[in-house]
Amino acid sequence: MSEIDDIQKLLRLKRYEQPPEGYFDDFLLEFQRRQRAEMLKRPLWELAWERANLWLEGFRVPAIAYASILVAALGVVGLVVNSPNAASPRSGLTAGIAPNQPQLNLPAVSPNGPVAQVSSSALPPSYILEKRPVTYDAPFSF
Amino acid sequence: MDEPPEPKDADLVARTKDGDASAFDELVRRYSPRVYGLVYNMTSNHEETNDLLQDIFLKAFRSIRGFRGDSSFYTWIHTIAANMTINFLKKRNRRRGVSLNDVDAHIENDPDYIEATSSSSTDPRREANLAELQKKLNEALQKLSHDHRAVVTMFDIQGMPHAEIAKILGISEGTVRSRLFYAHRQLQSYLGEFRAP
């Protein structure tokens, strides 16, 4: 028999050292008393937080439901961004330009088409004639 | 008539999480004797063990929401117990006197006890009585480091397998074996007089 076996046999005898009879019943009673006392001492916000968590857990919403809600929310955001109104340069594109980025000072676009806006002092005066001369005669008068 | 089967630990844990304090009481009832054994054999003091055991189960109750069930409740509660006891022993700057429990009278029939304490004409040093053996065993255990004592307590006294000890202490099985080897070597020198000739 090895010396280690002897040591192990001696150590196993420690199992016979036991607390007094009924100790574990008393231990449980003392534990319950301390446990309840501790619960009463807890701050209100902590109890409220725990209750709220318990209440939320009660729903038992599966993870796939959260994923579906996320996908739906992303879809709505996508629709809003891609809507025709959102594509106009005034509302969509210029809104996203950061203030410190250089901006093109483009003229406003009229609904009838682009109009050149040139400073009148920079060019010599010129006159633009109508294609058709102005007349006061009634058209197609015979 | 058959008694209803005992609820599984996992069910009791789930019920505790749902706010059923009586489910945790059942876990305390189930595991307090074993956890007591671990703490008592590491501290060699019944009063300190009693206080620590209360703290261990209160901590477990407070933290049960964080118990995800990756390990068994048995492993989890023993991990809490081992860590808290080792921390307690590190902080205990001056060792309090031992306060040992009475030894169960059944020890008198244990062949290992008879062998260890029997009078031997060839070796009078082995003549010993129960109190002396208990004192010597505890003194020897207290001379071990906290980590070595934890491993010896779990393996030699409580009979846990290496793998379980490794999980509880968060170390490898090789480290468990190595700690046991060095602890046994130390104990051999302290308990030499009680070994078989």
Image: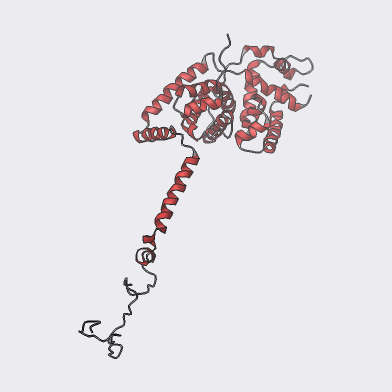
Q: Is residue A55 left or right of residue B60?
A: left
Tell me if I can see residue B145 in this picture: no
Q: Quadrant of the C terminus of chain A?
A: bottom left
Residue B33: percent from left, percent from top: 56, 21
Colouring method of the image: secondary structure
Q: Going 68% across and 32% down the picture, which residue do you hit?
A: B162
The quadrant the N terminus of chain A occupies is top right
Q: Residue B167, position in %: x, y?
A: 62, 34
* Nearer the observer, A53 or B146: A53
Q: Residue B175: x, y in percent?
A: 67, 38
Closest to the observer, A62 or A131: A131
Q: Is residue B125 visible?
A: yes
Q: Report the residue at 34% width, 33% height from top.
A: A44
Q: Which residue extends farthest front?
A: A142
Q: Quadrant of residue B10?
A: top right
Q: Measured along the vertical axis of the image, is residue B161 above or below residue B5? A: below
- Residue A57, by quadrant, is top left
Q: Identify the residue at image location x=76%, y=27%.
A: A3
